Image (cartoon, rainbow, N blue to C red):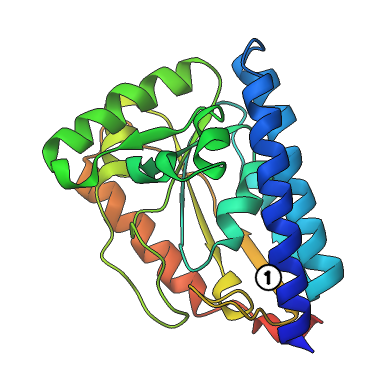
């Protein structure tokens, strides 16, 4: 049954991707924030389908920790679920992504108009400069910045190497960091066609002050908080 439901979901998601890529192209004359509200209708629909078709629900804890000004979200990366859901669970965000994603037919066309920070991950220190330059602009425009410091999705129970990019941006701009832990990989595994029903827990931590702290210090603080909370999250299937 999970296979059949996942197949139907894949077809519907593909159809939505094509439709909203065209909507995104037509939204070009609008302001960045207006485009964001329109295009992320796709995100709402995909997560709604995941709930009603796949049985993937979610709860969000710690919304009271969100600061009242644009911040930098540093989050665990396990699944495609959070790349979709976080764009509407949080204030308008500009996600840091690899440039290659913008070349994907339909999906990339729409994503380009969502105001992302697209970087060349092979560029080393130059990539850090891209994050700081573009990230500062996004923060000034009222967008938050979303960074997955591990860079790539990791399986539940595993930990990737935390990159310094998000901490570097925070140290350079003074914007607070909001750490986020979640267990989406337990129900929507990396590169898995078949998804499983369950409830994703998204846990938002207290904002981390950044002024006067180095990028390395901030990265270590984020890593410690996220990885500690990962061990405390309930199993995704526990709240079905």
Is residue 204 in view from this perspective?
Answer: no
Is 7 situated left or right of 110 in this image?
A: right
Is 193 situated left or right of 6 in this image?
A: left
Specify the quadrant of the image occupied by residue 173: top left
- Secondary structure under the numbered disc 1 in the rendered image: strand
Is 67 situated left or right of 174 in this image?
A: right
Residue depicted at x 78% and y 74%: 54
Residue 40 screen position, x and y as percent: 69, 38
The C terminus, quarter of image: bottom right
Residue 216 screen position, x and y as percent: 20, 49
Residue 146 screen position, x and y as percent: 47, 42
Specify the quadrant of the image occupied by residue 19: top right
Judging by the rendered image, the residue that carries numbered circle 1 is: 200
Residue depicted at x 52% and y 66%: 79
The N terminus, quarter of image: bottom right
Is 228 situated left or right of 7 in this image?
A: left
Is 117 rendered above or below residue 17? Answer: above
Nearer to me, 229 or 20: 20
Specify the quadrant of the image occupied by residue 234: bottom right
Is residue 76 in view from this perspective?
Answer: yes
Is 100 rendered above or below residue 54? Answer: above
Residue depicted at x 64% and y 84%: 235
């Amino acid at each position: 049954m999970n296979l059949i439901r996942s197949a139907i979901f894949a077809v519907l998601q593909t159809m939505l991707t094509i439709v909203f890529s065209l909507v995104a192209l037509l939204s070009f004359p609008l302001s960045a924030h207006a485009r964001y509200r329109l295009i992320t209708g796709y995100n709402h629909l995909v997560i709604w389908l995941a709930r009603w078709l796949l049985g993937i629900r979610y709860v969000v804890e710690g919304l009271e920790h969100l600061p009242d000004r644009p911040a930098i979200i540093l989050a665990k990366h396990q699944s495609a679920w959070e790349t979709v859901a976080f764009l509407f669970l949080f204030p308008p965000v500009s996600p840091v992504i690899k440039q290659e994603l913008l070349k994907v037919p339909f999906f990339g066309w729409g994503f380009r108009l969502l105001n992302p920070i697209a970087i060349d991950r092979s560029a080393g220190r130059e990539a850090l400069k891209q994050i700081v330059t573009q990230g500062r602009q996004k923060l000034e425009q009222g967008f938050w910045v979303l960074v997955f410091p591990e860079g790539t999705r990791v399986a539940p129970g595993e930990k990737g190497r935390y990159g310094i990019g998000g901490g570097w941006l925070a140290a350079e701009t003074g914007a607070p960091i909001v750490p986020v832990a979640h267990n989406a990989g337990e129900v929507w595994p990396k590169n898995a066609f078949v998804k499983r029903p369950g409830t994703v827990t998204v846990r938002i931590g207290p904002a981390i002050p950044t002024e006067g702290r180095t990028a390395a210090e901030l990265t270590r603080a984020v890593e410690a908080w996220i990885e500690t909370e990962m061990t405390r999250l309930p199993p995704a299937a526990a709240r079905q």
